[in-house]
Image (cartoon, rainbow, N blue to C red):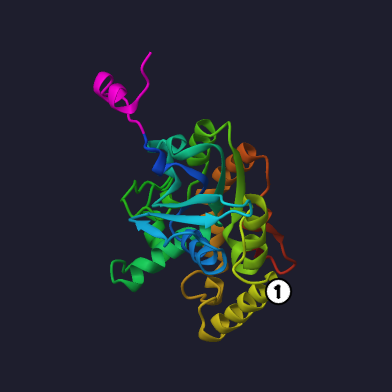
Amino acid sequence: MRTDKKYLSDTFPELTIAPMKNKFDCLVIASQYSGAREVFDLLKQNIITGTAPEIHQNKAILECKSAKEGENLRIGIFEFESLEELCKTDISEYLLLQAKIYLMLRNPVWRSFASYRKNREEGKERSSFIEAVKWDSSPPEVGLGPQNTRYIIAGKYSEGIRSLLKQTDEHELQILEYEELRRAPFKILQELKESLGLQFRVSSEEIALNLSKQKVAGRRLGIFRSFRHNPAELDEETAKYIYYTYFKRDIEEAEALLSTSFTSWKFAEKALDGSYIARF
């Protein structure tokens, strides 16, 4: 039986045959504001690459030098508006046989707030955060109905994860948390290097020092300022309400699917003064 691509596409036009150039040794998948661009910059700046990076809308491609002589690895970084888009995307067609997958996840309360804040900065949003999310896929008891602001939808993970697991059950899937990337970028970079067999441009000591300096400089400029330091935008009670109303069940389902625990995303028990301690 003939299996060349032209014959198959002519005979079975309903088939979509992905060219080999679109297949990857590794995929990094994330929703917006969850670390895709940070990972791209981290690899581009510190890993030896064979060709210039390619960027196509929400996809970036890096061809990296492997630690194995004469081999290159293709890494794709895909950023989706939300993980729900994974239900409409056949990720498996982008994967080589032994490809690895990294899924970037961020605390959904802060993920949804990042989307809201971006719209505020661009003048697209005038409501307070709590007012905006009440209009966004509200549960029946709220009685408002979806208004397509997508702040909450963009933070839901379980359906996208379920779809991804079904598509990639023969591949290794690992979770990278955005919060860990912010706290310890070198740790994440080292993990990717060792797991994929990549090569650093300079010594690991020099990279660690450079990343440490960048983090200090970023703090001085306010780049790494935590959202919770702006109580006028997202106070503890608002974060707690959003967590329990919109994300608690979804987080629990995601934990069950991935056999992991996102402890830092949850609220601890009440403190002695009656307040909730949010661990972000």
Count of numbered labels shown in the rendering: 1
Q: Image height check: is 178 above or below 260?
A: below
Q: Position of residue 34 (x, y in %)?
A: 50, 58
Q: Please say whether residue 45 is one of the residues in the magenta stretch.
A: no
Q: Image height check: is 2 above or below 122?
A: above
Q: Position of residue 103 (x, y in %)?
A: 55, 48
Callout 1 environment at 10 Å: few (<14), some (14 to 19), or many (20+)?
Answer: few
Q: Which residue is at 48% across, 52% downward?
A: 30
Q: Please say whether residue 10 is one of the residues in the magenta stretch.
A: yes
Q: Which residue is mark 1?
A: 205
Residue placed furthest toward the front: 70
Q: Which residue is at 44% across, 60% downward?
A: 51
Q: Position of residue 195 (x, y in %)?
A: 66, 51
Magenta residue span: 1-17
At numbered mark 1, what does the secondary structure look like: helix, strand or loop?
A: helix
Toward which corner of the image does residue 139 lie, by quadrant? top left
Side of 148 relative to 87 (left or right): left
The residue closer to the viewer here, 199 or 236, is 199
Toward which corner of the image does residue 182 lie, by quadrant? bottom right
Quadrant of the frame with the C terminus: bottom right
Residue placed furthest toward the right: 272
Regarding residue 29, the answer to whether it shows in the image is: no
Side of 229 relative to 53 (left or right): right
Q: Which residue is at 68% across, 63% downward?
A: 187
The residue closer to the viewer here, 163 or 13, is 13
Q: Amino acid at mark 1?
A: Glu
Quadrant of the frame with the N terminus: top left
Regarding residue 45, the answer to whether it shows in the image is: yes
